[in-house]
Every structure is written in C-alpha cells, then in structure tokens.
Amino acid sequence: MSRYQSTELTIWSRLFLLATFFAVLLPLSAHSTERANYKNWDEVIAAAKGGTVNWFMWGGADNINQYVSEYIGGALKQRYDITLKRIGINDTAEAVNAVLGEKQAGVNDDGSVDLIWINGGNFRTMKQGNLLFCGYHDLLPNNQLVNWQDQSIANDFGLAVDECEVPWNRAQFAFAYDSARTKNPPESIPALIEWAQKNPGEFTYPAATDFNGSVFIRHVFYHAAGGPSSLLGDFDQQKFDAIAPKAWAILNDMKPYLWREGKTYPNSIANLAQLFANREVALYFDYDPAIFGINVENGIFPETTRSFVLEDGTIGNTNYVAIPYNSPNKAAAMVTANFLLSFDAQFEKAKTNVWGAAPAIDIDRLTEDQRNLFAKLPRHPSVIAPSVLSAKALPELHPDWISAIEKGWQYNVAK
Amino acid sequence: MRILPAVMCDLEKELEVKRQRIESGEGLSWLTWFSLILLISWLILPLIPLAVWSISRSWFFPDITPSAYSLRAWSYVFSNTSEVLPALGVTTLIAFCATIVSAVIGVPAGRALGLYQFRGKAAIELLILAPTIVPGIAVALGLHVVFLNIGLAGSYLGVLIVHLIPTLPYMVLVMAGVFANYNPNTEAQARSLGASAIQTFYYVTLPAILPGLLIGSLFTFLVSWSQYILTLLIGGGRVVTLPLLLFNFASAGRNDITGAISMIYILPGVVLLLLGARHLTGRNSAAESLRQI
Amino acid sequence: MLERWKIVLLLSPALVIIAGLFLGGLILGLIGSLGYMPLLGREEFNLNAYRNILASERFYLSFLLTFYIAFTSTVIASLLAIGAALILRRSFIGRSVINFLFQINLTVPHLVGAVGILYLFSQSGFFARLAYEFEIITKPSEFPALIYDPLAIGIILQYVWKEVPFIGLILLANMQTIGRDYEAAARVLGASRWQCFRHVLLPLLFPGLLAAAMIVFAFTFGAYEIPALLGQNYPSALPVLAYQAFTDVDLNARPEALAMGMIIALLSVIMIFGYAHLARRYVRS
C-alpha cells in the first residue's frame, strides 16, 4: 500500500514539477506562439510583403554570396517584394552571440538578425537558450518536400529540430588530394595514420576550434571507439573516459609527423586549404565536398584535385536556417526559408557552377521532370559522387559529446 | 646646453659651415642610399603581392608569377553582390563624419589647452590622452550592452560615435599643439577693426591653424578609416565597412578578392596623402603639430 | 572669471564625449566583469571572472605573448625609425619622392599590411618561392615558419612595417624643431658623429621618441585584427582571447571577456603613469 502510494506521489510531484517548468518556460517562449497570428500561408505572404530579411551567414565564399544575393535575393524581391540583406560574418557564433547579446540587453522584439545559416552547437545554444522562433513548419508549403522521417534531418547533431529550423543543405565529410602528386591516398583512418608517418609534414588538421578540425577529430574518435554506434545519444562521461585516452594517444602519436611537427595547427579550414593549394600538405578535407570543385574553379586548387571517402565511413550533417525569437521580420524570414526549400532554389544551388551543394529536400518527392533535371546535373570531376559518399554516411554526435571532445583535444593534444 | 649659444658666438663662421654640411652639403653615401632604398622597398613590398593576387587566377607554390591571370576578382568586387562599393561609401562617410565632428569639438578644446593655463589642466590632458593609449576593445566591450539598449548598436550613428573614442583625442592633441604656437592678439586686433566673430574666425584664426587642422584631420580620417574591431563590435555586422569585407575574404583564403579589396581600400588614403603630403613634412608649423601626438 | 567660463565652454564638448564614452565604457565594462547582468537576473557582484582568468594558464601565456609582441615591435620600429629619420632629414636628390614613399603606408590600413605580410612571408609565400627558385629549399616546410609561428615573427614584421613611418615622421618633426645648432656646436667642439648623436641629438629627441613609442606599444598591445590573422591558435594574443570570449555562445564567458578588457585597460593605464613619471623625471634631469 505504502509503496503504491509513494509511486502515486511521485507521479503527482512529477506533474507538479512539469507544470512549474512550463509556467516558468512559457513566458520565456511566448514568442513561439506568434505563429498563431498567421492562419495560413497567404497571410504570411501578405505580412512579408515589403519586409527586409537580415540573413547572417558566413561571407567568405563569393559563389555562395552570389547565389544568395543575386539568385535568392532577386527571386524574393521579384516574387514576394522582400528585400534580402546578406550579412557576411566570419563565424556563425557571431550571429548567435548577437541575438544573445540582444536578449541580455532586453531587445526582445526588434532584433537585428532575421535568419541564420546554422547547425550543431550553435543551434543547441539557441534552442536551449529559447532564442529561436519555433513551430511554423506546417505553414510552409515546401515543408512537404522534406523527409522528416529521415533522422539525420529531424535531428541536428543529435538534437531534435522541433520545428525550430528549416533544412537548407546536406553535407558529408570527404577528403581531397592532388592526383598529380599523390598516387595512393589513405582511404581509412588506420591507413591515414600509417600514411602520415611515412610522409612526415604532409598532413595536418585545423585546431578543434574550427568546425572542420573538430569533425576530423571525431572521425579519429569513432575509430578509437570502433564505430559511432556506442557514442550516439546523450553524453556519457564513463564512455567518454573509456574511449578518449585511446583517441588522444592516436592523435599524439601522429603529432611528430604532422605539418610543423604538430607544434601548431592551422587556425581554420581556409588555412588548411592554402596549405594544400601551395603543396605544403598533401591532403585536404572538408565537411562540404562541393568546396573542392569551387576551389578548382576559382584557381585555388589544382585541376588534378580528386576526392575520396573513408572506407570506415565519414560523418554527414544537415545544415539549416533558423529565425531568432526577436526577429522583427518573421513573416519575411519564413517566406525566405520556404523559398530556399523550393525546387527552383535547391536545383540552382546544386549546379556545380553555382555551388554544387547537396539538396536538403527529398528528390523522390519532386515531379518526374524535376527529378530528371536533378539526375542530369553534371558532377564536377573533383567532387566525389554523392551516391558513393552517401553509401558511407555516419551520423553526427550530440553537441555535448562534441564539446567534450573539443575541450579534451585542447587539453590533451594541442598543448 | 644653455651655454651653447655663447660658445656659438665665437665660432660662428666655422659653425655655419658645419651646419650647412649637416644639412645638405654631404649628400648621401652609397651605403646610406642602399639602406634607404632597402627601407623604402620594404615599406612598399607588402603591397605588391596584393596587387598581383588581384589579377591572378591561380598562383601556386613555387611559381614566382601567377600561372593564370583573370579579372574575376575585380568583376566580383565591382558586382552588386560583393557590396564593396557601398562599403567604400560607408567607410568614407563614417571617416568623413568622424573627422568633421572631431574637428568641431576638438578645435575649441585644443584652443583651451593650447592657449590657457588653468587648474586641473594636467588631469584633463591625461584624460584626453588616455583613449589613445587604452585599447578601444576594452572600452567597446563595455559600451556594447548600452548601445544595444538605446538602439545604437548596428547603426551608422553608433559606429560613428564609437569611432570618436580614438579619433577625437588625436584631434584635440594636435590642435593643442597648434594653439600653443598661436598668437590670439591678432584676433583682438581684427575685432577692434570691426570684424565680426565669424569674420575673425574665417579670416584670421582659420588661416593660421589650417595646416595643423589638415594634419589633424588626415590622422583622424585614417584612424577611423582603418578601424576594424570597433566597427565589428558596435556595428554587429550590419554596418559593413571595407575592413570587414577584407577580413571576411582574407580569413577565408580568397587571395584574389582580398587583393582587389585591398587595392580599393588603400586608394583613398594614398590620394589624401598626395594632397596633404607637403603639409606633413614641409618646414612649416604643421610639422610642429605632429610632435604633439 | 570670464576666461574661466570660456575655458569651460571650449573644453566641455570634448570632455563630455571622452568622459561619457571612454570612462563610461570602462565603468560599464568593470560592472559587467563583476558578473552584474540584471537582465539575465544576475544582480550580485563577484570576482569569479577574474578568478577564472587568473587561474588559467592560457591567460598568462597570452599575456606574455602579447607583451613580447608589443615590446619587440616597438623597440625594433623605434630603432629603424631613428635611422630613417636621420637619413631623411638630410637634403638629397629625390628627397621629396622618398619622403612620399616613406609616408605611404601610414595611410595603408593595418589589415591590408597584414595580408601583404602573409603573402610575402608564409611558407609558400613570395620569399619561400624565391628560395625555391634559388634551390635553397625544395619544399615549403623547409622555409622557416614566420607566420602562425610561436615567435609571432609575422605579427612583429607587420607592426614594424606599419610603425616605422609613424615614429619616423614624429622624430622628423621633432628634429625640425630642435634645429641643427646644438649638433653643429658639438661638432665644432670636437664631438664625433656618434658622440654628437648620442649626447646631443638623442637626449633632445627622447621625449618625442618616448611618446611615439608609448602610443605604438599601447596600440600593438590592444590590437585585434593582426594577431587574429597572422597569429597561431595557441596561445593567442590577449585581445583575440578577449574577443573570442566575448563572442562565445556561452554567456558565462562574457564577464571573462570584460575582465580581460579591464586587465588590458589597467595595464595601459599603468603604462600612461609610467610614461608620465619617466617624462617628468627626464625633464627634471
């Protein structure tokens, strides 16, 4: 009896806790209910008319800038009378920080950011800090082109999207090498370790503070763990402690054979690209293989650049656009996000001379004509075929795992 | 040192010869010429790869010259997408306004510090000197929240205001130096002859302080013009000036576009220098003012 | 009495702006560094940020690096500037052209200079290519690491590049005011060129040199963009560390960023007083 009672109490106390939780949370997330203002898409379009969207995104690629400013900006102006302002930043964290700073300063409805190109840790920060406008997916007509059953879309680095962001691109980590210089590039992590020892100074990776450096380190971590399966889900300190020393040992063993004997690491992926371009190192990698083709077209990489995927698989992710809670132009931002998902915008973006980014929409949900257009898109010779790549896709880790790995690397390897 | 003039009387002739020799007669030895050329080339050298990069398409190690040339970077820079030209306008406008505001506020303050002795003058001089020494980043981090609150963050006005922190002290200090060598009696004479206050300023004061004012303005303009971190912090990315675009592409490793933006970025400064160079080193009172910085 | 009001009137706009923005910014920074962020519901003061900073090895390394960069750049730039000014004050054919060239990079923004230095001195930069051409090296890694290097040589090169004309012009202006009489007298009295420079000109130039050097030191100590572009990732220069903390997505890092700003400011203030002290002692002697 007493046992029964106590269980009941627990349920009640839990409910109470939950209620308190929501009571506290609701005022904070009052903005999320704003979608009720718009009954349907037409109302959103009407409200968006004449609006301006400040889209904060990384500004260091002229082709992406051109696609966004000219193609997307032009179409939005023409079709919806929306002015798109692309705001080039060096790091997505700057935009997150801007919203955070505004919240700190009490700027709750007139923020400077309307849209952010985002994923992973930055998304987690914004979602957990209630900095996002959420719950509007069913308003967007093009949302039906997205396969939300796909866990790699429904979860952003292991964190549920919960209608707080809209997918834009998919990307999967791949390596590049110059086929004129390097004959047999290492196609697995063990092979890479061996290769690095035989070719001292020819390999390095950016520091963990860089997005791409961090993902390389995760590949080593997966290798140390014997695959990602045991690392999925929430962070587990015990598992981490069991695997981490192995991963640090691999990376530390590699260190003397790295560029500059591992005494320093490139600050950013752009630095690694320069090293590769100037033959200081023989291997390059990027979370977005489209960049290989873009760099060849821009004359940064040699035309003999080719790419490959690791046999043990490489990590893939989806990247998204999100609307901050204090955006003064939410309707226009929603119209922008919806247009980004459209066949037109996704197809344009997939062209190799534009960007070559993999679509975030499900090709099977398009009309046959549209599917054929996608199928006929030429592939850049320097960029690995999407089908070969996706056959080796590995999932991303939860952001808590990622920050633990990044911190651990700083402490155990960088020093 | 004080007795030197007395010694000079005895040795006047010999002295004159020596003075002339120090000043001009000797010319430069080949070694001096060599080091001078070395120094000047070192000063100019970093600008050369930027210019070459701006017209190159691929330029890999170990090529001394690019293997392919292209004007793509320039066509991007002049396209609407790049926003380089609007950024050029914004950078110029902010620097120009910062200069005007600094002059309007700095000239009177410089006059007070240059012409008058009063209690607390040393403290005020120190306060005005302080922002040239304390790095702007320390101040701007603190101002950021308040600027957000009053809606100045992300606005041109906010960036202009924050640029005054490093620019205004330069102007005040330069003008204090100018006024220290200025004789206010000529103003009184003009007034007694019936000139209005405005006429006096325009016909008497302004011509006398103009060389110094130009130097101060040149410095002020350049300090605002080169500003990166204050613009980034307070402008929040929405006030796009040339250094922001340059940093974007430099950190992304796009050397060709970086080179092209750099060329555009240095042009106005060089033009200003051409216009103002003779004031900088000529044998006039303007050079004096530089000493005050 | 009338004059007093006049002085107040002339000074007040400048003082209001400098006091309001500069002192205001510092005070707000101080408050924030003490963890006071009312809109986030943090209304008490604490020293956690300072404690965290002063307990981290990274901060000390950054501080040492920043000080080393500022000190080395200032000393090298001052020495070169003295040499340049000594040559440039003489009359020679083509002086005006040389003078113009000497001043040109005074107008070139630091950021542009930094990129130029990067393209010249990186391991695949222009000099590395020349070295390859002359078969001194066979691959980029054999070229000495001058960019992203532990000794921050690239950063120092950039500052020297930019500050030599700045200090040089201030010295030239000083030399013009001082005139040649003292030196000429010294030479007549039998001083060698070196003695003349060491015992006559240098002491006269010293106050101006000290002021210029202090401005350069303070600037290099607080500059962000050059070490951000040319520095290695660990340890990074103090302003880079402060900016990174300020833009950290974890708001808890913000008081630390502000605290670092305060420490940078404090060190600069100490330098001002040190300078004032030195200058006063110098005038007295």
Image (spheres, coloured by chain):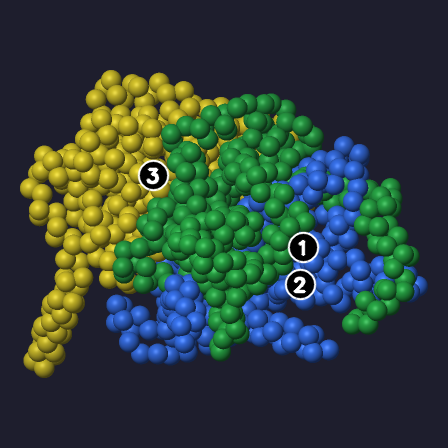
Chain colours: A yellow, B green, C blue
**What is the x, y in percent for residue A49?**
16, 35
Residue denoted by label 2: C208
- Which of discs 2 and 3 lies nearer the camera? The answer is 2
Residue denoted by label 1: C173
Q: Disc 3 to disc 1, how far (Cα)?
A: 46 Å
State left or right for residue C189 relative to residue A262.
right
Judging from the image, mark 2 belongs to the subunit labelled C
Residue under the point 55% across and 69% down = C268
Judging from the image, mark 1 belongs to the subunit labelled C
Q: Amino acid at mark 2?
A: Gly
Residue under the point 54% across and 52% down = B208
Q: Quadrant of residue B163?
A: bottom left
Q: Quadrant of the C terminus of chain A?
A: bottom right
Q: Decide: marks 1, 2 in contact (CB < 8 A)?
A: yes
Do the residues marked 3 and 1 share a common chain? no
**What is the x, y in percent for residue A260?**
66, 50
> Which disc number belongs to residue A86?
3
Q: Residue furthest bottom?
A: A2
Q: Disc 2 to disc 3, how far (Cα)?
A: 47 Å
Q: In terms of depth relative to the viewer, which is nearer, A165 or B154? A: B154
Q: Is residue A398 visible?
A: no
Q: Amino acid at mark 1?
A: Ala
State left or right for residue A2 relative to residue B254.
left
